[in-house]
Image (cartoon, rainbow, N blue to C red):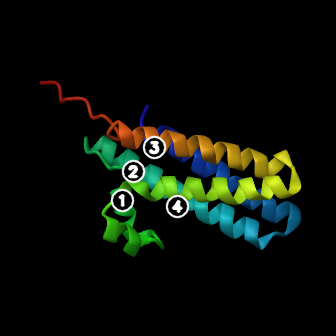
Amino acid sequence: MHDFCFTIPYGFLVLIGGIVGYLRRGSAASLAGGAGSGLVLLLAGFISLKAFEKRRNSYFALGLDEFSILNLAFQLIGRDELRPIICSLTLAYIMGKRYLETSKIMPAGLVATLSALMSLFYLYKMATGANHIPPKAD
């Protein structure tokens, strides 16, 4: 399974969750966190999909450099494929902490669990060499 197959739906869920949180509770933090994280994940998934269509391995959206707040840190360590995993680990930590404080499954427990699962998926993809590009048939 390719990373964009999960990153794009995950990004949509996080984005929609941030918008719903804002509409239901008027929470600007929900909008900023959910929409911001969702858009970064969607962008990473889209760039990865486009790279795969061109038969290239994106390592989770290398082209996200220009749009990332963590641009300098990623350039310094030279690991561009860490962007989606950093986003999912951050969401898992923040929402996991909120779940422990409130014991509410929705949204904190759900987002923390989903983000932890996505972090494991990204670690697996990094360990196995990202998207496997099949050889071009002649």
Using the numbered discs, state the Cα–Cα distance from disc 2 to disc 1 in whole angstroms.
7 Å
Residue 99 location (% of width, % of height): 80, 53
Residue at (67% x, 66% y) in the render: 33
Residue tagged 4: 40
- Which marked residue is nearer to the observer: mark 4 or mark 1? 1
Residue tagged 3: 123
Q: Amino acid at mark 3?
A: Leu
Residue at (41% x, 39% y) in the render: 125
The mark that comes first in sequence, 3 or 1, is 1
Front residue (pair 136, 94)? 94
Q: Secondary structure at mark 4?
A: helix
Question: Mark 4 and 2 residues: CB-CB less than 8 Å, in contact?
Answer: no
Q: Secondary structure at mark 2?
A: loop
- Which marked residue is nearer to the observer: mark 2 or mark 1? 1
Q: Quadrant of the N terminus?
A: top left
Q: Amino acid at mark 4?
A: Val
Residue 37 against residue 131 in the figure, above or below: below
Q: Amino acid at mark 2?
A: Phe
The mark that comes first in sequence, 2 or 1, is 2
Q: Residues within 10 Å of mark 4 (few under 14, many from 20)?
A: many
- Which marked residue is nearer to the observer: mark 3 or mark 2? 3
The mark that comes first in sequence, 4 or 1, is 4
Q: Residues within 10 Å of mark 1 (few under 14, many from 20)?
A: many
Residue tagged 1: 80
Q: Residues within 10 Å of mark 2 (few under 14, many from 20)?
A: many
Which residue in the rendered view is the most extreme toward the left?
138
Residue tagged 2: 60
Q: Amino acid at mark 1?
A: Asp
Residue at (59% x, 61% y) in the render: 37
Residue 138 location (% of width, % of height): 12, 24
Using the numbered discs, state the Cα–Cα distance from disc 4 to disc 2 in whole angstroms.
12 Å
